Image (cartoon, grey):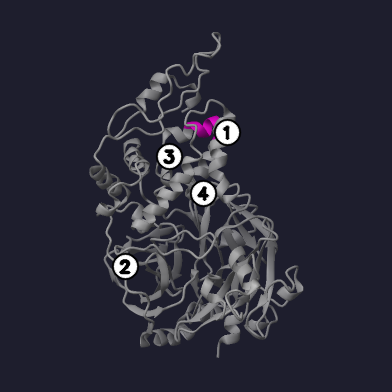
Amino acid sequence: MNWLAVAATAALAACGGGGGGTPIDAAPTDAATDAPTDAPIDAAVVLPVFRNPVAMPDLELARAASAQLGVGSTLVCDQCHALTRETFDRWQTETHVADTCLGNLHPTSSAQAKAIMDCFRALAGNAFDPRKVGIYSTGGSLAWFQAVMELAYGETWQTEWASWGSRVLMPRGTQAPFTQPQFDLVAEWFARGLPRLTDVIDSTPPPDGCVEGIAADVATHVSAMQTAGWGALNHDDGINMLGCAGAATPRDCLATFPLSTASAFSMRWAEALPASKIRILDGYDHRSSFWTRSSADGRFVAHGGGPGGATIIDLQTGREIPADAAYDPGFFPDNSGFVIQGGARAWCRQSLLTSNPAMVSFTEPECSAVGVVGLYQHLGAVRNGDYWAVAGQFVSDNGGGEPSANFGAGGQGELTPMIWNGTAYTARPEVSFASPFEGDTIIAPSAKLLLSRASYQGAQSGFTLRRLDATPSGNSYTVSTPVIGRYCVSGGKPAFSYDERWITYHHWVQAGDWQSLGFASATDPEFVAMRQAGTANIFLLDITTGVSVRVTRMNAGQSALFPHFRSDGWLYFIVKDDATPNHETVAASDAALLLAP
């Protein structure tokens, strides 16, 4: 529908709502009095209503709006977010930011409409970001937003609309977009400042901090993975690892790639472990978005960001492959397939990448749709069995500082087993598991372990390790997820090694880190600069002992982020540097290989 030619009567027909009354953004009755008398009838720009007022008492509104968002038995926003008081407070703050972009709800020119959209883009450079839109993202598919998009971008509005929908629209996953009356309820509650929030949100306190403990099951599992894990299986299957031709040992791989000490970053950042090596695999001139992940053989690296929406880098050829998707890449541990959220059919065979495509549109025959898997998915696989994905409540982490951990008592994760039937990935029914005060859950390559970030008073208290016991039941599984480990360290974007002895994560320098970084006091000027500019390092944690070691030594304004393993034990990560904000680096460390007995 072309909203620029809609008459005022049609606009009034769009004013459904939860309480009646004059729309909040109703146009003045004399809005068109200054139009030329000979102007075409359809020249006046009359937009649909943004939202309608809702006439409910505060408590009734709080109950209705919070239920619409997922508080209670209906799964909506709580599929991805813990609906705690801290989460609602954060959404309220983000909504106040969005209000600064919505000072003019009646743009009458392309420039005015584009100013609104440019404002929504500003938080994340030149990309739409739901944090800039706040709770209004739940109405992002409604007529007002479409009309503003048409007015702002003219003939190219559909391209921008697709980008808006893939990045901003909430709720995500399989949830239906909000209708106008549903959006009116939620927007009204936030406009009033979330009255009676404490009456509708559970205030059950989290556990008291973190008590470290590692069950004997952990060592038993790690021992079994020495021969049954995907690191060993991929080696036995003869999967060729990037840069390993002629290498006597895995540590000798990647020898043709320059050391970090010989790169443009020479003397600016380096290894934290004596005798370890960091090699520079690639550099690219765009800002990545959310996490980076690579294929099991280390050849392909993918992330959100770049000219295609997402980017896949072929490290073997140095090619950047645009991908018509958004973010959240993942690769199956057997080197057979990959996913990037936001693609039309997001689940693809890896053979698509080895065919050297000019771009990936996600309409290729190698791709299929598995619509039940939510955002922030992580992947595993059972040898001669099903592929697995885990998703659930998460805290967005785009590399902007130590992530919070606002996970509530009702936290749960969703496991999706799936099969490759020869032509497509097909999902079995999802299986839920309880994970109170936990989120950002990942799955081990073997699909036999789960790891979550644990919450205490809105901050991370540590990591929780669970065993995943899956028993076939009908067309799916029943599962149990007993806790077998707790580790009292904090950090974001954890990942398992393929032998499942290690987890890796990034951690931003915090006030109490001065001693572990080798400073004499918290007032050392270099340490103060790290805190003020923002600095992040990569860590390795041995899940059998709980011992954590730092892999990198980054300087103020530099961040090593989104670490993950390839199959042979090399650890990949990216580096962002405030000195070169539009250039990022893919690096690899042999730290886990060095530390292995």
Q: Which residue is mark 4?
A: 129
Callout 2, which amino acid?
A: Pro
Callout 3, which amino acid?
A: Ser
State the separation of the CA atoms marked 3 and 2: 32 Å
Q: Which residue is mark 1?
A: 153
- Circle nearer the N terminus (3, 2): 3
Which one is in front in this view, the residue at disc 4 or the one at disc 3?
4
In the image, residue 480 above or below residue 431: below
In the image, residue 530 above or below residue 156: below
Task: Kindly state the secondary structure of the residue where label 3 is placed.
Answer: loop
Q: Which residues are magenta?
A: 147-157
Report whether 316 appears left or right of 447. Answer: right
How crowded pointer 1 is (Cα within 10 Å; few <14, some 14-19, many 20+) is rated as: some
| Contact check, label 1 and label 3, Cβ < 8 Å | no
Q: Where residue 131 sits in the image (x, y, percent)?
A: 48, 50
Q: Which residue is mark 2?
A: 436
Q: Quadrant of residue 517?
A: bottom right
- On residue 141, the disc is 3
Task: Kindly state the secondary structure of the residue where label 4 is placed.
Answer: loop
Q: Where residue 259 sits in the image (x, y, percent)?
A: 72, 75
Q: Is residue 103 magenta?
A: no
State the separation of the CA atoms marked 2 and 4: 28 Å
| Contact check, label 4 and label 3, Cβ < 8 Å | no
How crowded pointer 2 is (Cα within 10 Å; few <14, some 14-19, many 20+) is rated as: some
